[in-house]
Image (cartoon, rainbow, N blue to C red):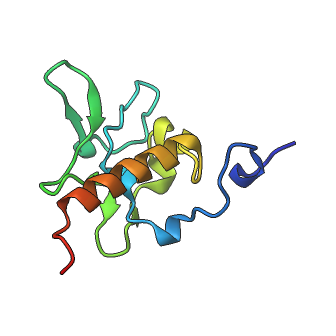
Amino acid sequence: MMSEATDLPDIDRSISCQRCDAVCCRQTVLVMPEDTAVPRHMIARTPHGLHVMAHDEDGWCVAVDPTRMNCTIYDQRPGICRAFRMGSPDCRSVRDAYSRLYDEAAPPAE
């Protein structure tokens, strides 16, 4: 029985949340009807009527503690956050996209 995310075959074990900018916390996170533990004041509604985790003015999920870069509602987080696995293909894709964006925005080296 696989009990840890790192036991899954498609997980890159070299990736660690402790060495990341929490870029997954800038993604749109749908809040499903079964996500009843998510604090209502942290939920926004899109123009299309979807319930999502709200973002602050810098684009971060409002549940992220900006000092420690961790989730303040970890035990109450939405199911989609629970399913997101560190080092998974989705995680690597988000990290790669963020790195490309950051590299493009960075000033050229002199």
Question: Which image quadrant: the N terminus?
Answer: top right
Residue 70: percent from left, percent from top: 41, 65
Q: Residue at x 53, y 43 (%)?
A: 84
Left or right? Give the position of 93 relative to 8: left
Query: Residue at 65% of width from left, 54% of height from top?
Result: 12
> Nearest the camera: 72 or 55?
55
Asked whether 22 or 104 is in front, the reply is 104
Q: Quadrant of residue 49?
A: top left
Asked if residue 55 lies left or right of residue 78, the reply is left
Residue visible at 57% across and 53% down in the picture: 86
Residue 17: x and y in percent read 51, 64
Q: Is residue 70 left or right of residue 40?
A: right
Task: Pick whichever, 21 or 42, lies toward us.
Answer: 21
Q: Residue furthest bottom?
A: 110
Could you tell me residue 21's position as x and y percent?
Answer: 38, 65
Count of marks placed on residues: 0
Q: Position of residue 47 (x, y in %)?
A: 13, 23
**Left or right side of 16 for 22:** left
Q: Relative to 95, say whether 83 is above or below.
A: above
Q: Residue at x 28, y 61 (%)?
A: 103
Q: Is 48 above or below relative to 100?
A: above
Q: In this orientation, which residue lies closer to the viewer: 96 or 16?
A: 96
Name the image quarter holding the C terminus: bottom left
Q: Is residue 1 above or below residue 47?
A: below
